[in-house]
Image (cartoon, grey):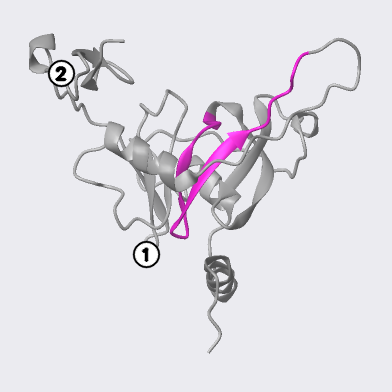
């Protein structure tokens, strides 16, 4: 019996189902039809989603070329709202990261946008999970969007495949220390109580 690679399994799954596309995910919470509570939940910014190969291809104000990166799936480039560059999540149970192109400054003509390097979405999402969540709210979630707009402090969206709606969750306060005295040395490294990434997330961290 032939063994399939991970990418082949994902491809078969996506082809056999009416799977959500990257732009359907990114634009989902931007419409009243896709928002579980449009009167009380923030609406995200709708994006054009045009195909791009650099920032010059994105003519809508406030948009950049973003590489929608997934493990074992070729990155797709779309024009997206630049305030969401760096966003993370899952699409059809596969971790993703939105890495935007940059346009370097230089002397003379011929300056073009630079494609972002490939990242490991699973690692980025797992690392963020330990910083901004409590009680593993993302566990088992197939379609997830964690906004990067305010340094990941504006919460996340989870898609319900039964209601076809997105529900917003605000990031909770999660302070784990208040005084330096609560942070003893770890493996010989002196620590203090500091804020990361904001004042709602106090952590013991190396003094240096």
Mark with earlier residue (1, 2): 1
Circle 2 crowding by C-alpha within 10 Å: few under 14, some 14–19, many from 20:
some
Name the residue: 60% across, 57% down. Answer: 73
Q: Mark 1 points at which residue?
A: 162
Q: Is residue 79 left or right of 191 when viewed as pictured?
A: right
Position of 179 relative to 90 (above/below) = above
In the rendered view, does 160 fall on the left or right side of 105? left
Label 1: few (<14), some or many (≥20) within 10 Å? few
Residue 185 circle label: 2
How much space separates mark 1 and mark 2, taking CA atoms?
Answer: 49 Å
Tell me the SS state at disc 1. loop
Start and end of the magenta stretch?
Answer: 84-105
On the image, the x and y values in percent for residue 21 come to 58, 56
Confirm whether the magenta stretch covers residue 101.
Answer: yes
Magenta span has 88? Answer: yes
Kindly identify the residue that appears in the image at 20 percent across and 13 percent down.
190
Whether residue 76 is situated above or below residue 147 in the rendered picture: below
Count the labels in the image. Answer: 2
State the SS at label 2. Answer: loop
Q: Which residue lies furthest to the bottom in this view?
A: 1
Q: Is residue 149 visible?
A: yes
Q: Which residue lies furthest to the front in this view?
A: 188
Find the residue positioned furthest to the right. 109
């Amino acid at each position: 019996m032939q063994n399939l690679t991970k990418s082949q399994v994902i491809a078969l799954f996506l082809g056999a189902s009416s799977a959500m596309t990257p732009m359907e995910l990114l634009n989902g919470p931007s419409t009243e039809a896709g928002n579980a509570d449009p009167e009380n939940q923030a609406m995200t910014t709708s994006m054009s989603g045009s195909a791009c190969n650099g920032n010059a291809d994105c003519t809508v104000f406030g948009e950049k070329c973003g590489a929608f990166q997934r493990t074992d799936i070729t990155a797709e480039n779309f024009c997206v709202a630049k305030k969401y560059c760096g966003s993370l999540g899952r699409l059809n149970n596969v971790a993703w990261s939105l890495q935007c192109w940059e346009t370097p400054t230089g002397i003379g003509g011929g300056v073009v946008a630079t494609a972002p390097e490939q990242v490991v979405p699973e690692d980025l999402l797992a690392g963020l999970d330990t910083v901004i969540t409590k009680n593993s709210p993302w566990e088992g979630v197939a379609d997830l969007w964690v906004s990067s707009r305010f340094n990941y402090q504006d919460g996340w969206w989870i898609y319900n495949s039964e209601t076809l709606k997105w529900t917003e969750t605000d990031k909770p306060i999660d302070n784990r220390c208040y005084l330096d005295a609560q942070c003893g040395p770890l493996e010989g490294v002196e620590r203090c109580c500091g804020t990361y990434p904001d004042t709602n997330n106090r952590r013991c961290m190396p003094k240096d």
